[in-house]
């Protein structure tokens, strides 16, 4: 029952989400941000999957000691489909919306990844999209 409900929610989200670019599909609109998935980046191998997501902000995020100012983030996620877990593999920060242009900063995550259960509806949707198509 839970899987059927998740699949139904996924279908509704995919049908209702406008495509901002041919490869980016809106997963969630927030107050000052939008979360998208790069559909062309989804790769599956056995029980594992990977995909790039994008967080794009309406306003520029201020610079910090660790990062320059940025407007969007591309995040490479790894998915363990059998264990229903998710891990961040890499982050790239961009000065332009929707992960466009050249990266202003990068952050690699060392292997082994820190696997965790999805903590939000957005993470659960991304897991379903990457693992179930």
Image: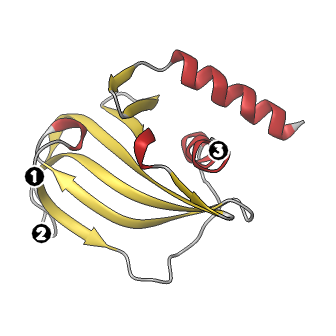
Q: Which residue is mark 2?
A: 65
Judge whether 48 appears above or below 124 on screen.
below
Q: Residue 84 at what x, y percent from top left?
A: 70, 59
Which of 117/46 is in front? 46
- Give the distance between the C-alpha atoms of the residues marked 1 and 2, in whole angstroms: 20 Å
The structure residue drawn at horizontal position 40% and vertical position 37%, both measured from the top left corner, is 35
Is residue 73 found left or right of 59 in the rendered image?
A: right
Q: Closer to the N terminus: mark 2 or mark 3? A: 2
Q: Which residue is mark 1?
A: 102
Judge whether 94 appears above or below 15 on screen.
below
The structure residue drawn at horizontal position 34% and vertical position 44%, both measured from the top left corner, is 54
Q: Residue 104 at what x, y percent from top left?
A: 10, 58
Q: Quadrant of the C terminus?
A: top right
Circles 1 and 3, Cβ within 8 Å, touching? The answer is: no
Question: SS of the residue at dot 2?
Answer: loop
Instruction: Find residue 36 and report its image quarter.
Output: top left
Circles 1 and 2, Cβ within 8 Å, touching? The answer is: no
Mark 2 Cα within 10 Å, few/some/many (few <14, many 20+)?
Answer: few
Judge whether 38 appears above or below 90 on screen.
above
The structure residue drawn at horizontal position 56% and vertical position 17%, both measured from the top left corner, is 15
Question: SS of the residue at dot 3?
Answer: helix
Instruction: Find residue 6 and report its image quarter.
Output: top right
Question: SS of the residue at dot 1?
Answer: loop
Number of numbered discs on residues:
3
Taking the view exactly as shown, the residue that stands out farthest to the right is 1
Q: Residue 123 at what x, y percent from top left?
A: 56, 47
Q: Which residue is mark 3?
A: 128
Q: Closer to the N terminus: mark 1 or mark 2? A: 2
């Amino acid at each position: 029952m839970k899987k059927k409900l998740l699949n139904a929610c996924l279908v509704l989200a995919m049908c209702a989400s406008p495509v901002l670019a041919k490869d980016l599909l809106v997963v969630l609109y927030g107050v000052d941000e939008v979360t998208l998935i790069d559909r062309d980046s989804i790769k599956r191998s056995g029980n594992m999957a990977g995909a790039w997501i994008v967080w794009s902000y309406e306003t520029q995020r201020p610079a910090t000691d660790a990062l320059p100012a940025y407007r969007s983030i591309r995040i490479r996620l790894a998915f363990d489909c059998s264990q229903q877990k998710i891990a961040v593999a890499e982050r790239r920060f961009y000065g332009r919306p929707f992960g466009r242009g050249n990266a202003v900063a990068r952050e690699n995550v060392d292997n082994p990844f820190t696997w965790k259960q999805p903590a939000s509806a957005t993470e659960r949707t991304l897991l379903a999209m990457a693992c179930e198509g």
